[in-house]
Image (cartoon, rainbow, N blue to C red):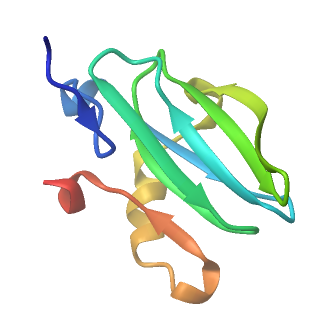
Amino acid sequence: MSANTFDGLPPIPAQEQIACVYTNHGGELQILRIENVAGWYFERVIFSDQTLAFYATREAIAQIYSCGNAGCLLDDRIRCLDLQVEATVLATAESTSPEKKTRVLTRSSMA
């Protein structure tokens, strides 16, 4: 049985990871989940108007669940390649003030 890495960084070398950003433009709480990468499971809650920055693999698929009074329903599937940004965007986001509602996962904070 292989060990899984839960949340955090994908189990591949840093130079093969891609920087991604997703913003919840809806009025409801959303959950972003990636579970199609062997040995890695990633899940984060994203509040309305919040931006999540994270690293993923090129083959990763982000599943977006919208959550309301009736529970959470799968709303969309997005290739992480379509969410890809330059890695410098993540470094810039680290210095963003809390009023911007930016949540960032970086290699340095996960080490």
Identify the residue shown where x is 14% and y is 15%.
2
Task: Return the x and y of residue 59 as percentages of the image width and height.
Answer: 48, 15
Residue nearer the viewer, 73 or 59: 73
Residue nearer the viewer, 17 or 78: 78
- Image height of 33 relative to 25, above or below: above
Task: Return the x and y of residue 98 as percentages of the image width and height.
Answer: 53, 86
- Image height of 79 relative to 87, above or below: above
Residue nearer the viewer, 21 or 9: 9
Identify the residue shown where x is 81% and y is 62%.
28
Identify the residue shown where x is 29% and y is 39%.
6
Q: Is residue 85 visible?
A: yes
Q: Is residue 79 left or right of residue 25?
A: left
The quadrant in which the C terminus is found is: bottom left
- Image height of 58 relative to 41, above or below: above
User: How many dots with numbers?
Assistant: 0
The quadrant in which the N terminus is found is: top left
- Image height of 16 relative to 108, above or below: above
- Say which quarter of the image contains residue 57: top left
Q: Is residue 17 visible?
A: no
Q: Is residue 99 left or right of residue 34?
A: right
Residue nearer the viewer, 93 or 66: 66
Identify the residue shown where x is 68% and y is 27%.
78
Q: Which residue, as the protein is rendered here, is positioned at the far front? A: 70
